Image (cartoon, rainbow, N blue to C red):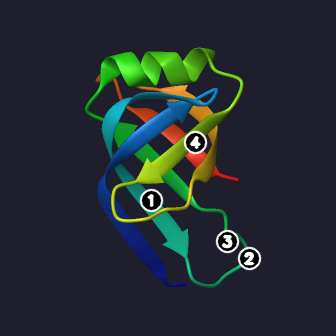
Amino acid sequence: MSVLFLNGSGSLICDGVDAGQIEFSIAEPADGPDTTRRGKLWGNRQAITAAMDAQKVELKPSDAHDLLSLDVEETDRQGGMSFSVL
């Protein structure tokens, strides 16, 4: 199984409102039985807190025009957030 890692910065959009800039890393499996893209956000606790309370969470990478819809999974003690890309 091969995996491509996407790393960068971007804006976290919560219920249509820009909650702030964050850093992210997304693992994108290229093959195998599970091709779900999963990742982690960090670097802005206020934005991550807003995402935990939001109905709709999206990531807008700085180098792209498309929004990625996220399924928030959990937060960690360091203020990061795990997610799956829908």
Tag 1 and tag 3, C-beta contact below 8 Å: no
The label on residue 35 is 3
Q: How many marks?
A: 4
Label 4, label 3: how far apart the Cα atoms are: 19 Å
Counting residues from the N terminus, which is met first, the one under dot 4 or under dot 3? 3
Q: Say which residue appears at 62% left-offset and 44% top-offset.
A: 70
Mark pair 4, 1: CA separation: 13 Å
Q: Which residue is mark 4?
A: 58
Q: Earlier in the sequence, mark 2 or mark 1?
A: 1
| Residue type beneath disc 4 | Glu
**Given this view, does label 2 or label 3 mark the residue nearer the observer?**
3
One can see residue 4 in this view: yes
Q: Position of residue 42 (x, y in %)?
A: 32, 35
Going 70% across and 69% down the picture, which residue do you hit? 34
Q: Nearer the viewer, residue 85 or 17?
A: 17
Identify residue type, mark 3.
Thr
Q: What secondary structure is found at the residue carrying circle 4?
A: strand
Type of the residue with mark 1: Ile
Task: Name the mark nearer the viewer: 1 or 3.
Answer: 1
Local SS, label 3: loop
What x and y, as percent, mark residue 74?
Answer: 55, 28
The disc placed on residue 26 is 1
Within the image, what quadrant is residue 47 found in? top left
Residue 69 appears at what percent x and percent y? 64, 48
Q: Nearer the viewer, mark 2 or mark 4?
A: 4
Q: CA distance from mark 1 to mark 3?
A: 12 Å
